[in-house]
Image: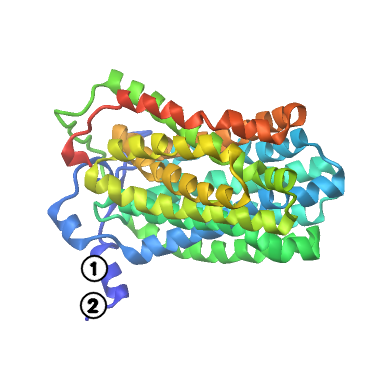
């Protein structure tokens, strides 16, 4: 019986990543990223060991990220913060990630950095330690920004590794990668309820051990990735005759950004303020509200996983249509529901709306395959940036109008999904 290590050596380690040394500024070119999967790649299938490792690392990374939002009630009480200041913490964290991710992706398109993931995770490690001892609001902002910096380094190159290990099943690989991140995001509120709330802000330092574990795993993945980077002259890939022209590509990218805006801003409204909404409207405890937030985030994780394979099978455009617009009836009902009904509605909202994530990202990658790292960085960065900016704006609105009004306005965001009508039909060979 073929052991996993033999499978990895025979089917994965011998696939080269081509990096130009003769053409300055040439992007990293992975064969599976720029053309239809070959028969050999399809028969080999995904490199499950690598996908599991990068997904688990995503789980650890996003667990630490979500911890920041989960401890907002503690920070708000300890330092007498208003909602606008809470929003600025999210902005500080996500602005560094948003600003730097496209830069990191553009750089790694030119020269792959197999150990950059482990090094970037070190920033998250120090950010958590600083957050655990912070006693002033500016120090909290710096700590949040350091965690965001680690995220900026992690996402573009890890998305490239996930696709390289996909065996041609790009949506599936992206979903496995997103699954780890989504579950990590959902674990933040639970860990905050079980550890940070009882033991206080200094207990955040305990989570630096998670960052250390992630550093070890990502270093091992870097060891796997490094031998595949071989020097070879860059050869441009022939453009598919049915591929959309440059004008349609630009329009499609703008539409995908708008769709991501509608999705991420709504998710951000729930992730950042749902705890306060439940406490304000239903009078639940902080720990109970964090568990309700976990339910929503866990539904997000399942939706992110199933969306990718469905896109591989039925087409990413149809999944995007269903995901964005399908959540609209449930988001419109949420502001008027009771506590139990709100929990049920957030399950449907989280599952449906998050199923678009993998399809949006893979769709964008297929539109510009020679700029894979940059596109991944832009879309991951836009998602973070929209979340951060949206959280700051929504916090300001909540201070003046009340938290319930925020959810009445955000309920209409999925209607932006109508813009999906402008997305082109991609050639079947490139799906």
Q: Position of residue 19 (x, y in %)?
A: 33, 44
Real-space Cα distance between discs 1 and 2? 10 Å
Furthest residue toward top: 247
Q: Is residue 33 left or right of residue 412?
A: left
Q: Measured along the vertical axis of the image, is residue 425 above or below residue 117?
A: above
Foreground label between 1 and 2: 2
Q: Quadrant of the N terminus?
A: bottom left
Q: Nearer the viewer, residue 7 or 322?
A: 322
Looking at the picture, tell me which residue is in the foreground, 276 or 363: 276
Identity of the residue furthest to the bottom in this view: 1
> Is label 1 in contact with label 2 (beta carbons under 8 Å)?
yes
**Residue 257 in sight here:** no
On the image, which quarter does residue 323 sit in?
top left
Residue sitting nearer the eye, 233 or 319: 319
**Count of numbered circles in the view:** 2
Q: Quadrant of residue 286?
A: bottom right
Quadrant hosting residue 197 = bottom right
Name the residue rendered at 70%, 27% in the picture. Answer: 397
In this picture the colour scheme is: rainbow
Place of residue 289 in the rendered image (x, y in percent of width and height, measured from the top left): 68, 53
Q: Residue at x 15, y 57 (%)?
A: 40
Mark 1 or mark 2: whose residue is earlier in sequence: 2
Q: On screen, 195 above or below 367?
A: below
Classify mark 1: residues with Cα within 10 Å, few (<14), some (14-19) or many (20+).
few
Residue 10 is marked as: 1
- Residue ID for mark 2: 2
Residue 119 position, x and y percent, is 57, 54
Q: Is residue 233 above or below residue 251?
A: below
Which numbered tag is attached to residue 295? none
**In-image side of 35 versus 97 (left or right):** left
């Amino acid at each position: 019986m073929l052991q996993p290590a033999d499978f990895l050596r025979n089917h994965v380690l011998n696939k080269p990543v081509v990096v130009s040394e003769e053409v300055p500024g040439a992007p990293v070119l992975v064969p599976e990223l720029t053309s239809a999967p070959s028969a050999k790649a399809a028969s080999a299938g995904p490199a499950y060991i690598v996908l599991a490792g990068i997904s688990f690392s995503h789980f650890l990374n996003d667990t630490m990220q979500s911890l920041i939002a989960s401890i907002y009630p503690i920070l708000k009480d300890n330092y007498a913060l208003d909602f606008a200041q809470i929003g600025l913490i999210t902005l500080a964290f996500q602005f560094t990630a948003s600003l730097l991710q496209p830069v990191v992706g553009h750089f790694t398109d030119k020269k792959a950095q197999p150990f950059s993931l482990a090094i970037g995770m070190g920033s998250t490690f120090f950010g958590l330690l600083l957050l655990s001892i912070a006693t002033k609001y500016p120090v909290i902002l710096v700590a949040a920004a350091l965690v965001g910096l680690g995220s900026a380094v992690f996402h573009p190159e890890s998305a490239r590794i996930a696709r390289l290990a996909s065996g041609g099943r790009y949506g599936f690989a992206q979903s496995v990668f997103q699954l780890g991140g989504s579950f990590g995001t959902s674990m933040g509120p639970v860990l905050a309820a079980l550890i940070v709330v009882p033991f206080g802000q200094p207990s955040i330092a305990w989570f630096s051990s998670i960052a250390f574990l992630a550093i070890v795993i990502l270093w091992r993945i870097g060891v796997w990735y490094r031998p595949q980077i071989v020097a070879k002259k860059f050869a441009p890939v022939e453009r598919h005759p049915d591929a959309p022209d440059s004008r349609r590509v630009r329009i499609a990218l703008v539409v995908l950004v708008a769709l991501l805006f509608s999705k991420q801003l709504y998710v951000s409204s729930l992730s950042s303020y749902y705890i306060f909404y439940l406490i304000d409207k239903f009078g639940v405890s902080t720990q109970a509200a964090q568990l309700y937030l976990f339910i929503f985030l866990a539904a997000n994780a399942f939706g992110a996983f199933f969306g990718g394979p469905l896109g591989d099978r039925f087409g990413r455009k149809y999944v995007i249509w269903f995901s964005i617009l399908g959540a609209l009836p449930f988001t419109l009902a949420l502001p008027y529901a009771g506590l139990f009904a709100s929990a049920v509605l957030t399950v449907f909202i989280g599952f449906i709306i998050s199923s678009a994530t993998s399809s949006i990202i893979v769709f964008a990658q297929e539109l510009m395959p020679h700029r894979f790292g940059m596109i991944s960085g832009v879309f991951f960065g836009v998602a973070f940036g929209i979340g951060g900016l949206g959280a700051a704006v929504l916090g300001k609105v909540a201070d003046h109008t009340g938290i319930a009004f925020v959810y009445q306005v955000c309920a209409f965001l999925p209607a932006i999904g109508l813009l999906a009508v402008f997305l082109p039909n991609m050639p079947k060979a490139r799906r």
